[in-house]
Image (cartoon, helix red, strand yellow):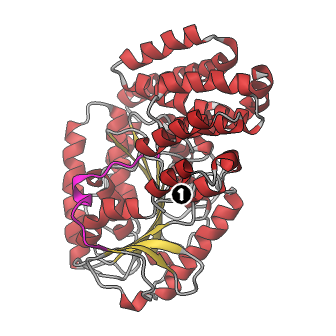
Amino acid sequence: MFRTIHRRYLAGLTFSVLLIAGAACNSSQKKSAEETNIPSTEPSKASAKNYDSGIIYEKELSPDNQFSYAIYLPSSGKNISKSCLIFFDPHGDGLYPVKRYRWLADKFGVILIGSYDLKNGMDMQQSVSVAQRLRESVQTNFKLEPSSVSVAGFSGGAKVALASSGNTSSGTVIYCGAAFLPNTIPSLPPSLGIFGLADMNYSEVIDFGNSIAHGNMQHALLQWNGKHEWPDSSTFQYAFYWHEFHLPDSGSTELEKDWNVFLADRKKALTKSESALGKAMILRQEIAFAGTHQFPGEPVLALQQLLASNEFRNDSVRFTKSLEAERSEKQNYLSAFEQQNLNWWNLAIQKLKSGQDLKSKRLLAYVSLASYSYSNAALKNQDWTSLEKILEIYRLADPKNPDLAYITACMYARQGKKDAAFLELRNAVSYGMHDRAKLESDENLAGLRGSNEYQEILFQVSN
């Protein structure tokens, strides 16, 4: 029954551990303006030496045939092809971040590689092994130093990027929209955390980042005006700055020019910031982005003075209380899955949707994530009574989430309701579900395979 499902999984679904799940991010990836009209190729057998610059190779095999990835060699820029950024997308969509940030690759002269081999649902130990071996393969095939190969991940991919980067001799790590519990990773290379103000993992990224800041590791946090998704390119350019400023032997005139541009941008942001906490974050960015370089204008003294001010202490107390209140609300929503009926949920979700504040948006996304986690658990146990209730809550919170439609289709398929299952599968595809391998291997859909309807749906889904 629902009570059994709830208690069995509640311990693993506290607000901080839900962050670790990181799996319910919407699989529909919208294309931005810079992603369109980009030259690209179909899958080919080109070796690393044969790639042409300025062209996105959509799906390539590594020379040893162990890894598949999208790849882009910059058409211009400094230090061209001397460094690389590897992306881990939670849905295994290697092409998406490569397309999203290819103009930044041109600007900074960085090779982009997007992995198809890592996705949500894989064992973390296996994911870390794959990520580390992929990094070694890239280093070998492109003749790159370990410190010039950085990794970047979003959501579940952010966790893989962090967990696979324990070697401080490796390049930097950029983690977006997810992290681990504080103090769980003892050693990291220079690390940049990026979080959206409307991201349900907002507080968790901050907590993890603050725990690193209290250690001896180089680290910075960067916020942007977004939700739980890959940051927009104007925000992600700071990830490229982070990568560039921490490259070995990068003390060049071009580097100093980029630093001056970055510093001017941060000074402007500092002037606009209205809170002591915001100012402290920006000053910390200036210090951490400089890395080991002795750039002029290091704001250490300014930060020390700010941290000692009453304004900062008061802001810190207010912010800590607001985070504690938000954590408490998250726990209440988790308890409500068992304790409250659908009428209560309907009113609660309507209230969140009508709220214009960022906290309401984060909590609504959190309910969606919890619904995803609970519904998967109930499906695995074939607890139909619990599952039907959870899916109704999921539908109230996030009606066009492809994971909602997909799990509903799996339930109907298990129950022998084929027409309803096909309808929900079509909905999942229309909402953005594009994991063909999952459709072909998921045992929940075994009863649908072989039919014309199934083949038609499979045809619509990209590999």
> Going by the image, does 307 lie left or right of 336?
left
Whether 106 is drawn above or below 249: the answer is above
Q: Which residue is mark 1?
A: 436
Q: Nearer the viewer, residue 149 or 263?
A: 149
Coordinates of residue 229 in the picture (x, y in percent): 41, 45
Query: Which image quadrant: the N terminus?
Result: top right
Secondary structure found at label 1: helix
Residue type for callout 1: Arg
Q: Residue at x 69, y 46 (%)?
A: 447
Answer above or below: position of 98 versus 370.
Answer: below
Within the image, what quadrant is residue 2 found in? top right
Q: Nearer the viewer, residue 58 or 49?
A: 58
Q: Where is residue 263 drawn, in percent x and y?
A: 23, 57
Q: Which residues are magenta?
A: 27-40
Quadrant position of residue 292 = bottom left
Q: Of residues 29 and 263, which is closer to you in this image? A: 29
Residue lying at the far bottom in this picture: please name it. 49
**Number of on-image labels:** 1
- Above or below, 352 against 446 in this view is above
* Mark 1 crowdedness (10 Å alpha carbons): few <14, some 14-19, many ≥20: some
